[in-house]
Image: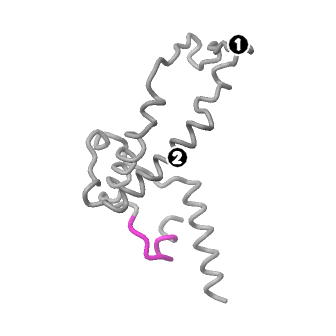
Amino acid sequence: MVQQLFSMTQLRDPQDPGLRQTAKNLVEVCFRNSGLEDLHAGVTPASAAGDYTDVVVTTPYGEIPWNRLSRLSDVEMKALMIEVVDRVYTFLVFNEQLNYGLSCRRWNEPKLHPELLAAAERRLRASDVTADK
């Protein structure tokens, strides 16, 4: 399926090592080094069961099982998304100056995400149908 998509378009080769490194650099510079670090900081509970079913958070209104607990408030999520969009935009504008990665060089190699790949295929096929009319 992937090869068919690339034969239908002028897209870049997904095996391009430069493209793979850019993806990792973008995530490190724009997402990992964002307010996400502040949200990630703190104490992570231990779980004797290993799946956190034995962990609860006690509030003035009762206990919340860890597996049902929201880790981000709506306010935190909104602030994070605004910051990340601004960081990605800046990264794209200044790609040559910011396209570096330090710790991400040790990360796993990126793969094409199946759901995004399927969405891209649907859009490409829809644009082909529209172009044929």
Left or right relative to 58: residue 113: left
Location of mark 2 (residue):
81
Mark 2: secondary structure: helix
In this view, 32 is above or below 112: above
Left or right relative to 18: residue 72: right
Sequence-wise, the earlier of marks 2 and 1 is: 1
- Quadrant showing the C terminus: bottom right
Kind of residue at disc 1: Pro
Which region of the structure is painted magenta?
A: 5-13
In this view, 111 is above or below 70: below
Q: Which residue is drawn at 25% across and 57% down?
A: 97
Mark 1: secondary structure: loop
Cα–Cα gap, marks 2 and 1? 30 Å
Location of mark 1 (residue):
60
Q: How crowded is mark 1: few (under 14 residues within 10 Å), some or many (20 or more)?
A: few
Q: Position of residue 100 (x, y in %)?
A: 26, 50
